[in-house]
Amino acid sequence: QVQLVESGGGLVQAGGSLRLSCAASGRLFSITAMGWYRQAPGKQRELVAGITSDGITKYADSVKGRFTISRDNAKNTVYLQMNSLKPEDTAAYYCASYRSSSYYGGIDYWGQGTQVTVSS
């Protein structure tokens, strides 16, 4: 059973920064692609950023240049550094584990989510 535990969410003023962490267990982390998604009230869950096992990243257009996804395979942890936060970044953020080393095959495990609230 794979477990994903997020941390690092909170309340921050616009223009501020937060770093989210997702600790994974129960799977060989180093060969699995990982992602961060978010869901705001009344909206669909959307991809924020993803990273393959080889470190290839992708980002939603709305966060390019502000957010950075990274991974530490020794710690089985994926991070999301969020800078220049905007009120529209307010959402529950979810860590996701893909079925393979790339994005093909989709997601099979989700974390419980961590709330990020950006005040104006």
Image: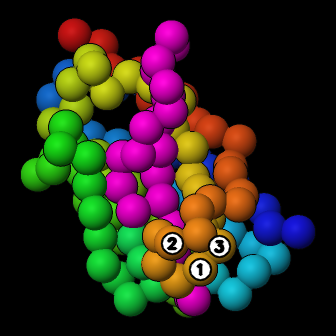
Instruction: State how far apart marks 2 and 3 are (Cα).
Output: 8 Å
Q: Which residue is mark 3?
A: 99
Measuring 57% from the left and 89% from the top, which residue is drawn there? 31
Q: In the rendered structure, are the residues bearing label 2 and label 1 in contact, judged by CB atoms less than 8 Å apart?
A: yes
Residue flagged by tag 2: what amino acid is it? Tyr
Q: Which numbered disc, 2 or 3, marks the residue closer to the eye?
A: 2
Residue flagged by tag 3: what amino acid is it? Arg
Mark number, residue 100: 1
Query: Can you tell which quarter of the image residue 28 is in?
Result: bottom right
In this view, the residue in front, 15 or 111, is 111
Give how far across and how far down residue 97 sits, in percent. 62, 64
Span colored in magenta: 30-50
Image quadrant occupied by the C terminus:
top left
Mark 1 nearby-residue class (10 Å; few <14, some 14–19, many ≥20)? some
Give how far across and how far down residue 113 sits, in percent. 63, 39
Q: Is residue 27 left or right of residue 53?
A: right
Residue located farthest toward the right when viewing the structure as drawn: 1
Instruction: State how far apart marks 2 and 1 are (Cα).
Output: 7 Å
How many dots with numbers?
3
Q: Which residue is mark 2?
A: 104
Q: In the rendered structure, are the residues bearing label 1 and label 3 in contact, judged by CB atoms less than 8 Å apart?
A: yes
Label 3 SS = loop
Image quadrant occupied by the N terminus:
bottom right
Give how far across and how far down residue 22 sits, in percent. 58, 59
Confirm whether the magenta stretch covers residue 17: no
Question: Does the image show residue 36?
Answer: yes
